[in-house]
Image: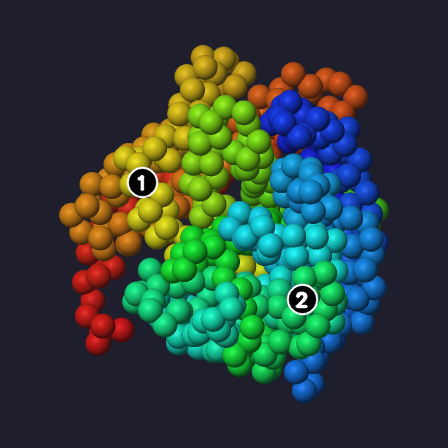
Amino acid sequence: MTVYKAPLRDYRFVLEEVLAVEQLAKLPGFADATPEIFAAVLEEGSRLCEEVLFPLNRSGDEEGCTYENGTVRTPKGFKEAYDAFCAGGWTSLACDPAYGGQGLPYTLNFCMEEMISAANMSFGMYPGLSHGAYRALMMHGSDEQKSRYLQHLVDGSWAGTMCLTEPQCGTDLGLIRSKAEPRGDGKYKISGTKIFISAGEHDLTENILHLVLARLPDAPSGTRGISLFLVPKFLVAADGSLGARNGVRCGSIEHKMGIKASSTCVMNFDEAEATLVGKPHSGMRAMFTMMNSARLGVALQGLGLGEVAYQSARAYALERLQGRALKGSAAPDKAADPIIVHPDVRRMLLTMKAHNEASRALACWVGLQIDIAERHPDPAERDSAEDLVALMTPILKSYLTDGGSEAANFGVQIMGGHGYIRENGMEQLVRDARITQIYEGTNGIQALDLVGRKMPVHMGRLMRRFFHPVDHFVAKHKAIAELQEFVVPLAKAFGKLQQATLLVAQRGLADPDEAGAAASDYLKLFALTALAYMWALMAKASLPKTAGDDAGFYLGKLATARFFMTRILPQTSSLLTIISAGAKPVMALDAEGF
């Protein structure tokens, strides 16, 4: 069986000892966001995740959602869990107090999103999408839209979706055919079909607010002609009361490989009443607000699944007796030794552990930058933080979801046949994790975004937001003897990243295929360097504390850091070699040859 306990000790270490989260309390509006508040909120959240959400994960997967005549029902226990989730204020954590939110930092919300995803990824889809809709309306909605809708998204009584994909278009949103006809009263009629709409219909909330991309009659072609509209399931009167059913219906739900307790819907819009969000033909800008929020949420899904896979595999490896240690019996009083003694099992567990812990630190670092970007009084600080978030979003989305999928597969491998069969739960993690590498922009698209958009923008300004702090850290600490085993590997990987960046930038200018062929390997090289930076920071924080009451925790950090630096980070050398090979080996074969 899978097991899960929220990594509260690791959160405290990362937030308080590595990232100095107390700095958030100095930002306007965050006076109450102290480390003590962080710890209290996460402890309370852990109880919800461990005791309410996690027990529903397997049963929700087995039962799935059901569809009948346009009505979708979530699995048994989900409605009660959702009501408890809302009653506890978890939908309002990082929302504006003006609309009933608690006004707490996004850094804290990131930690909660990881825990929720680890406990029950399908459940987390429902409030996660609603929060993305909240952010889109906060940034791009009219005052009337905000006053009419936001309080209901914040308290969780209404849900939100993002409706992009259509049968003929996924990544290429310029092919959208959904139409928006002006009614003449400031409202619009939306007609069209959207597919793969997560939480498009369900029984958890009183109303669902659909954010829909569509074209006005005079729209330019391509993405320049897309507008964003708000389409409520039930029409909403000026006083906030619900009226008649709108012209939007769920046509069916998908039968999927994983996340079966999350309803994935075909949504049909038949002259549905809508209001415009933002300006005409500017829908992509508004939708990217929601999409980027969703991409970071998906990254945290990958991390959460990686964590529960690791914890479950570790528990199994400590208990499963099979064979003897290579050096001789480790448990002579037992029929066999626990499989934790075997080097290859340890290799897989350490890979999972090293990835999860550095990814958690990296995610929290990015969460911190979101808060700084939104709250810091210095515009230069806000701009710098916003740049870093933009740069790291495709890296987090891609690498953390690849890592979550790898961890789930390692979990099956460690558990062997017991991992492959359904009743023990590990195979569900493999199935659930697979979608994270696909939706909200496939990981290949994230790599193209990194090299095609983030790398060249503003003459490399976004890249410098990461390069400068790493370069400063290396220069400051490379001469400190006890840190050299962590700083020197980081410096070497950073050098390879700089070399690859120059190579991809130069070749890509002459031939776009060069950048495209290098993109995925370049993103992985970047991610490994970023994780190495996190491990160097964590090693620095751990070294002075290896003789105290909690010495075992810090010694474990240092051992895992050494494993990462010596057994995982060297992949940067082969990645640079692959990148240097260029596009020709990828592009030379004619299509007919495949």
At 48% from the left and 73% from the top, the residue drawn is 183
Tell me if residue 323 comes above or below residue 460 in the rendering. Answer: below
x%, y% of residue 50? 80, 52
Name the side, left or right, on which 43 lies relative to 151: right
Residue 526 in view here: yes
In this rendering, position of residue 248 left or right of residue 13: left
Question: The N terminus appears in which quarter of the rendering?
Answer: bottom right
Asked if residue 129 is positioned above or below residue 6 in the image, the reply reads below
Could you say where residue 238 lies in the image, as x and y percent from the top left? Answer: 68, 62
List the residue tagged with mark 2.
236
User: Would you identify the image quadrant in which residue 83 lies?
Assistant: bottom right
> Quadrant location of the C terminus?
bottom left
Q: Residues within 10 Å of mark 1 (few under 14, many from 20)?
A: few
Q: Camera-side residue: 204 or 13?
A: 204
> Residue 538, how many percent across, how many down?
59, 27
Q: Position of residue 56 (x, y in %)?
A: 78, 63
Pick the front one: 252 or 185: 185
- Answer left or right for 256 relative to 527: right
At label 2, which amino acid type do we have? Val
Q: Is residue 350 above or below residue 494?
A: below
According to the picture, the residue beneath numbered tag 1 turns out to be 457
Mark 1: which amino acid? Val
Residues 337 and 164: in front is 164
N-term mark: 2 or 1: 2
* C-alpha span from label 2 to label 1: 42 Å
